[in-house]
Amino acid sequence: QAKDKGKNRVCFYTSDINDRLHHYQKIGALLRSALAADSLQLYFQPQIDLHDGSIRSCEALLRCFDNNALPVPPDIFIPVAEKSGLINRIGDWVIEAACKQLVAWKGTELEKLRIDINLSGKQLTNQHLADQILQTLHRYDLLPSQLGVELTENEVIGGDLEQIGQLETLKNAGVHISIDDFGTGYSSLVYLRRLPVCSLKIDRSFLHHAMENDSDMAIMQAIISVGHSFGLSVVVEGVETAEQDDLVKALSCDLAQGYLYARPMPAEAMPAYLLGVTGDRR
Ligand code: C2E
Ligand code: MG
Ligand code: MG
Ligand code: MG
């Protein structure tokens, strides 16, 4: 069906094996040329502190545009990057880009904002990743506490002790560590206690179903109370409506992220957004 949408569109969803190979090669080529042309971009989505409405962190979300300047979703290109081995170069680009952005925000109203980048589990297999991140921060004269990393639970739990050690190094240095899409993996709560993490991000599917489904509601409540009893802050993803916002506040989530507050935006749009938020509250 994706083919019918237009001749120049990248075909995203397809089952035929040749089509899949073609898709894979096409996205791979797109990523290589985006790296060469330095045309990848980070978008930023604010995280709102539900206790006081303040914004002290944002998530960096990678954007890649095709030859027609249409965005290719990361859920499409990240898996290709992981399979083709490009993820390490892309990951390095993201770390550099986040640091450059933090430097650019120095001396502005955004200088206190932490940037949380997404890491792929594949990147953790690079034994030098933690040192490399800390060295990059140092090279840009930034504090480790200005950066955060997000990993899904399976990526952390699937990792060996070496990989968990790297997260420990980052956390001990002051980098914020979050478990992304929490609740969708197979983490045991006992395990969670031993992991070097600061925050849990509840996958948005729970919030979306919690309004109608009692068991999703129960899962959300359980995650929040376990998170809190381990001293972790709990972030809820995908807040889209006022009803959902009321719910996450009633459940005493600590932070919220979602379209209701802001969609991911280019760095240039962030000052105006933050000004609007503080302006509204005065
Ligand atoms: P994620 O890390 O769980 O990011 C949250 C996703 O939810 C983002 O999708 C964001 O745009 C979207 N989102 C935020 N608020 C809402 C909302 O209210 N409603 C809905 N429906 N969606 C919302 P995006 O930007 O398409 O990214 C998808 C995934 O791609 C990310 O999921 C992350 O796993 C991956 N990704 C993005 N950037 C990077 C990166 O730099 N490196 C790696 N390894 N993965 C990345
Ligand atoms: Mg994330
Ligand atoms: Mg997530
Ligand atoms: Mg995700």
Image: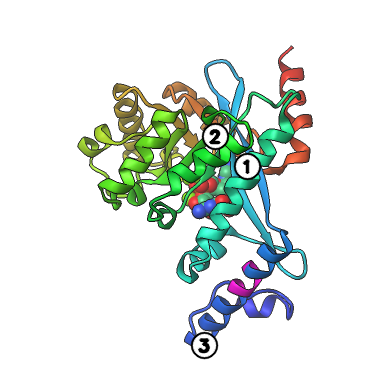
- Say which quarter of the image contains residue 267: top right
Residue 29 magenta-highlighted: yes
Looking at mark 3, is its residue's CB closer than 8 Å to ligand 1? no
Which residue is nearer to you in this view: 134 or 23? 134
- Say which quarter of the image contains residue 216: top left
Kind of residue at disc 2: Leu
Residue 265 drawn at (x, y percent): 70, 43
Residue 230 magenta-highlighted: no
- Answer yes or no: is residue 200 visible: no
Q: Which residue is mark 3?
A: 18
Labels 1 & 2 near each other (Cβ < 8 A): yes
Of callouts 1 and 2, the N-terminal one: 1
Kind of residue at disc 1: Ala
Magenta span: helix, strand or loop, mainly?
helix
Of callouts 3 and 2, the N-terminal one: 3
Residue 119 drawn at (x, y percent): 48, 49
Position of 87 relative to 238 (above/below): below
Of callouts 1 and 3, the N-terminal one: 3
Residue 84 drawn at (x, y percent): 49, 71
Position of 66 relative to 146 (above/below): below
Kind of residue at disc 3: Asn
Q: Label 2's element?
A: strand
Q: Which residue is mark 1?
A: 98
Question: Cα distance, mark 1 to mark 3?
Answer: 37 Å
Question: Which region is colored magenta?
Answer: 27-31
Q: Residue at x 37, y 40 (%)?
A: 167
Q: Which residue is mark 2?
A: 147
